Image: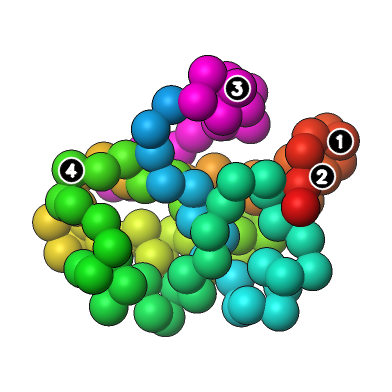
Amino acid sequence: MTKTITRDELKEKLDRGDAFHLIETLAPGEFERVHIKGAINIQFNRIGTEARRRFNKNDELVLYCSDEDCRASGIAAEKLEGMGFTNVRVYTRGKKDWQDAQLPVE
């Protein structure tokens, strides 16, 4: 089962400058419109190909999508875990929760 991360935990990791990859799993247009500051975009249906190319199996990967009803980040996390990635977490409340808290976006 995929581990989750809360908004406060994610903010602390970003504030500390922890080494991890923050990945928005929505379509590129959604990402370009607004995303959590420091995130990269890998659409959930491309996660397998991109992850193999860009990350090591033990890298910390934090995935998010739009909100609690969005399944894109969960689907991507399951795919990554099935590929042997060992340090995957999902910010289930997503971009809407982050923006509602008025935290930094780009």
- Label 2 vs label 3, nearer the camera: 3
Query: Which badge, 3 or 4, is on the more N-terminal residue?
Result: 3
- The crowd level at tag 1 (other Cα within 10 Å; few <14, some 14-19, many 20+) is few
Disc 2 is placed on an element classified as helix
Query: Which badge, 4 or 2, is on the more N-terminal residue?
Result: 4
Q: Is residue 8 above or below residue 100?
A: above
Foreground of the two, 101 or 59: 59
Q: Which mark is residue 58?
A: 4
Q: Is residue 91 above or below residue 14?
A: below
* Whether label 2 touches label 1, CB < 8 Å: yes
Instruction: Examine the rendering and report whether any part of residue 92 can be seen.
Output: no
The residue shown at (77%, 38%) is 104
For the rendered model, the colour scheme is: rainbow
Query: Where are the magenta residues, as a range?
Result: 1-17
Which residue is labeled 2 in the image?
99
Magenta span contains residue 11: yes
Disc 4 marks a residue whose amino acid type is Asn
